[in-house]
Amino acid sequence: MQAPHIPVLLDEVIDAFKDIKDGYIIDCTLGYGGHSGALLKAKHNIKIIANDQDDEALEFSKNRLKEYEDRIIFNKGNFKDVFKKFKDLPIRGILADIGVSSLQLDKQSRGFGFDSDVLDMRMDTSEPFSASDVVNHYSQIELERIFRDYGEVKEYKKAASLVVKNRPFNSTKELSDMFMKNFYKGKIHPATLPFQAIRIEVNKELDVLSELFESIEQNKPTNTIVAIISFHSLEDRIVKNYFKKWSKNCICPPEAFRCTCGNNNAIGKVVTKQPITASNKELKINPRSRSAKLRIFKID
């Protein structure tokens, strides 16, 4: 079955797990199964725990990866919980591609794009809370907060004020048209950052990313590669900070006169001092890869 999108940084992801000989790799964000399929094909002795909260993605990938069904465990759920659920298996790799999948972006019925007739943006459609709740019911102060903190929108006060004055909105098309009419039209669509902010709020994306890291830290796997692909600075900052924390031997407060923590608290080392980004060749084939950043950590 042909997948309708190209997984980002595919060669780089395969290379990240090149030293894994057996055991399980958790694909926290299965999507259309591009990364999982390539890993199963490249490494005949590994198994995949294929996780996604999107029913459509799971059904598609079950069909696409049918030839590998004896080496895959499919799991529906938020990726923040997947490591805790399977921690007793020999986990040797953890992969998370944090971006919105092409399935969600391209399907108008999901309400992620600028021209959709609905206002949704839920990654898990069984959840009741949607973009409509944020846009049509949040106070102006709350909208200012998410536009500022999650979208890094420069004119966040103006954006929030316009939403409040012009609502209710019934579709992302209505909302994106409003941003198009009232904001500077530069290289990116003026609704891009506000939509990012709304999507993050709906799906609690930054919270669940932090919870994934916390679950890994608390359950302390050994000899495990953690590879995370992020698509904007807020996610990348969380990844970078956790990897930095995990690589520190001394965790004493900066004002401490001398080390009293034992100076042996690092759980591994950062593999990528700088994030891996898409090659020029990939950028030509898949423009969506332009903002992808891959960071890798090796847990001892």
Image: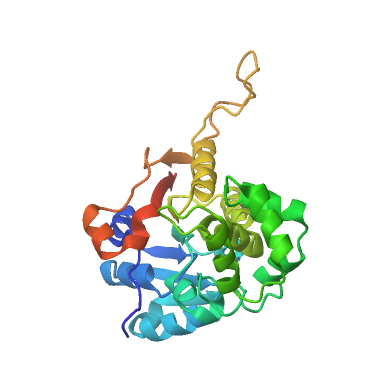
Counting from the top left corner in percent of width and height, residue 48 is at 42, 70
The residue nearer to you, when weighing 284 against 48, is 284
Q: Quadrant of residue 272?
A: top left
| Residue 20 in sight | no
The residue located at (48%, 50%) in the rendering is: 222
Residue most toward the front? 181
**Residue 89, placed above or below residue 244:** below
Q: Quadrant of residue 17?
A: bottom left
- 72 to the left or right of 158: left
The residue nearer to you, when weighing 197 against 168, is 168
Placement of the C terminus among the 4 image quadrants: top left
The residue located at (30%, 64%) in the rendering is: 286
Placement of the N terminus among the 4 image quadrants: bottom left
The residue located at (62%, 61%) in the rendering is: 198
Question: Which colour style is shown?
Answer: rainbow
**Residue 131, placed above or below residue 293:** below
Counting from the top left corner in percent of width and height, residue 11 is at 27, 59
The residue nearer to you, when weighing 90 against 124, is 124
Counting from the top left corner in percent of width and height, residue 5 is at 35, 73
Residue most toward the left? 281
- The total number of labels drawn is 0
**Residue 10, placed above or below residue 110:** above
Counting from the top left corner in percent of width and height, residue 24 is at 43, 65
- 44 to the left or right of 226: left
**Residue 186, placed above or below residue 59:** above
Q: Quadrant of residue 13?
A: bottom left
| Residue 264 in sight | yes
